[in-house]
Image (cartoon, grey):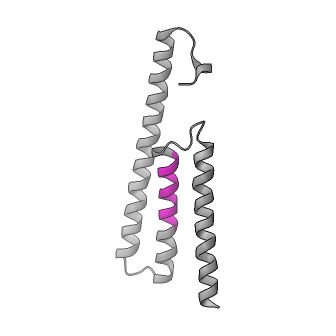
């Protein structure tokens, strides 16, 4: 807990922490449910023969990206204050990785 949120009253601080923990747990349960739903959607897309193969791959990759975002922000707590520097390095690494893949893909394909 941050020093500017302490009231000096242990009972008030305990109630505040319990409320914040309950809210955080609710977000994690909702996020977990959404990730399970997205996983079921991916399995349905793969198992259903009526879906074109050109739709399946981008659809599954999109679902995977959404799940990574859920995991970063809710399970790894990147949505909390004070996590800007790790987020900067993480997203910079993702950007450089995607740029490298794009560069090598264009070199090989053209």
* Residue drawn where x is 58% and y is 67% of the image: 97
The spot of residue 57 in percent (x, y) is: 48, 76
Q: Is residue 15 above or below residue 31?
A: above
68 in magenta: yes
* 48 left or right, relative to 110: left
Q: Is residue 31 above or below residue 68?
A: above
* Residue drawn where x is 48% and y is 10% of the image: 10
* Prevailing secondary structure of the magenta residues: helix
Q: Is residue 21 above or below residue 105?
A: above
Q: Nearer the viewer, residue 55 or 21?
A: 21
List the single residue furthest toward the bottom.
110
The spot of residue 25 in percent (x, y) is: 42, 36
* Residue drawn where x is 44% and y is 23% of the image: 18
The spot of residue 3 in percent (x, y) is: 59, 20
List the single residue furthest toward the left.
47
Q: Nearer the viewer, residue 1 or 39?
A: 1
Location of the C terminus (image quadrant): bottom right
The spot of residue 60 in percent (x, y) is: 46, 70
List the single residue furthest toward the top.
9
Q: Nearer the viewer, residue 51 or 94?
A: 94
Magenta range: 62-73
34 in magenta: no
* 60 left or right, relative to 4: left
Q: How many marks?
A: 0
* Residue drawn where x is 46% and y is 10% of the image: 11
């Amino acid at each position: 807990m941050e020093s500017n949120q302490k009231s000096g009253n242990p009972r008030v601080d305990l109630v505040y922490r319990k409320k914040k923990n309950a809210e955080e747990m609710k977000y994690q349960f909702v996020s977990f449910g959404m990730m399970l739903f997205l996983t079921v959607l991916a399995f349905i897309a793969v198992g259903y023969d009526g879906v074109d193969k050109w739709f399946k791959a981008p659809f599954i990759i999109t679902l995977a990206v959404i799940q990574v975002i859920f995991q970063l922000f809710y399970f790894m707590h990147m949505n909390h204050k004070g996590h800007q520097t790790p987020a900067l390095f993480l997203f910079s690494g993702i950007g450089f990785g995607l740029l490298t893949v794009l560069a090598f893909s264009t070199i090989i394909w053209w």
